[in-house]
Image (cartoon, helix red, strand yellow):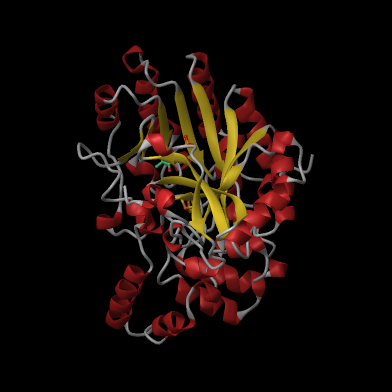
Amino acid sequence: MNMIAVSNAPQPPYVGTRLIDLIHRNTGSNELAHNARVVSQLLPFKVSQYAANYLIDWKQAPNDPLFRLLIPHKEMLLEEDFYFIEQALDDKPLLQSRITQLRQKLNPHPGGQLNLNVPNESAGMQHKYRETLLVFPKQSQTCHAYCSYCFRWPQFIGDKTLQIAMNAPQAMVEYLKRHPEVTDVLITGGDPLVMKTDKLKAYIEPLLSPELEQVKTIRIGTKALAFQPERIAFGTEADQLLDLSEKIVKKGKHLAYMLHCSHPRELEADIAQMAISRLLGTGAQLRSQAPIIKHINDQSDIWANLWQKQVNLGIHPYYMFIERDTGAHHYFSLPLIKAYDVYREAYIQGSGLCRTARGPVMSATPGKVQIDGVLTLPQGKALSLRYLQAREPQKVGIPFLAKWNPEARWWSDLTPYSEADKPFFEAQ
Ligand SMILES: *Cc1c(COP(=O)(O)O)cnc(C)c1O
Ligand code: SF4
């Protein structure tokens, strides 16, 4: 086996000037390093040792998809915004005010995340769909590395008014007792596997107690498989995580790791495969989801390959998302029609086992909207849509139509096709 030597002690990730130095060292390009310095003033960046050493193909930079996933690059900003920051680099107060100004422009809280979904009772949770509660432990409001397209970037830049996080599991337990309709708890972040296993355990153990028998499913969202597979593959923390997983499964709960998996390369390393087989050995289910992102995974062959690899490794393809309208959306987004074409062309390449990935899906304010295809009707072309999840559950599963708009990149760009479709677009 072609083992990668990774020590047990977590190695510090690259951030700030060390990240800029890394880019310079590995690409030999002053320009790429300078551009990264400018862009990283505005958006958060962090690259794990593992990602720097084994994921990014530096020789192909900047066109390598994993470079685009992890490294700040000029094209992420509009040209005028890039120069706006670049010209202020040596003037701290000016730079700070320009950063604040531009960040507001980048739509830090898309989908009404702050005002609409947070239970009034306590922060650090999101209860949007009847049966599922999202939990954001404070200790997991970061990731092992950051995706350049991350929609949670405001949580990483230290602006407290933009963060959603809870301090301790008590609030979660109390909320669940008051809401017996919740059967699924999804622990998310950031990345919950950034926490020590003990901390994670503090959130999970109450869910296993008889008083919370209502909880049938525990999901843990993570990108550790791509960014820090040693967290799962070996060492004391990994062993404890696997023990915890086994315990959850033995209690009769469905345990699912929701793996954020953007590119097939993330699944290739021996250590990533070892992490997968160890998780599967605990009886946990593995499911994968990721947004479709221009310059990173916007080709059908990449998705077909990704889904096939996942099936081979024991991972169920779950969702293909559309990137939210935040951050560098202008650069990473694709027209909805294009995303649908990529999905379909990937879908037809694999067997039914690869076709468990639903998509492309927009996680929008009223719900999760899937794009089902294009219809040609007597009155013209239409986009066929349906809710997979909705704030109003009675809207789920009913086909409805939007006016054909080849430029549309997000839910807000769509309008009802006819009078009958209007209720599906009404703000909720
Ligand atoms: C996607 C999502 C869920 C989970 O939905 P499933 O379809 O059960 O995977 C729950 N809450 C929010 C806010 C979501 O976006
Ligand atoms: S893993 Fe998720 S939360 Fe973390 S940086 Fe990537 S997109 Fe953001």
Image position of 287 (left or right of 83)? right
Q: Is residue 228 visible to us here?
A: no
User: Where does the N terminus fall, quadrant-wise?
Assistant: top right
In the image, taking residue 313 as reference, residue 147 lies left or right, namely: left
Name the residue nearer the viewer: 290 or 11: 290
Q: Nearer the viewer, residue 196 or 140?
A: 140
**Residue 40: image location, x then y, percent:** 45, 70
Q: Quadrant of residue 209?
A: top left
The number of callouts visible is 0
Residue under the image location 65 percent in, 57 percent down = 297
Q: Is residue 40 above or below residue 382?
A: below
Judge whether 99 appears above or below 377 on screen.
below
Q: Is residue 245 visible?
A: yes
Q: Is residue 65 above or below residue 183?
A: below
Q: 419 or 195: nearer the eye?
A: 419
Where residue 85 appears, x then y in whole percent?
40, 81
* Closer-to-camera residue (215/340): 340
Q: Residue furthest top?
A: 210
Classify residue 25 by image quadrant: bottom right
The structure residue drawn at horizontal position 68% and vertical position 32%, both measured from the top left corner, is 314
Q: Position of residue 28 (x, y in %)?
A: 65, 76
The quadrant in which residue 257 appears is top right
Of all residues, the one furthest to the left in this rendering is 121
- Most extreme residue toward the front is 378
- Percent x, y of residue 6: 63, 45
Drawn side of residue 261 relative to residue 43, left or right: right
Query: Which residue is painted at 36% across and 29% down in the image?
Result: 203
**Residue furthest out toward the bottom:** 87
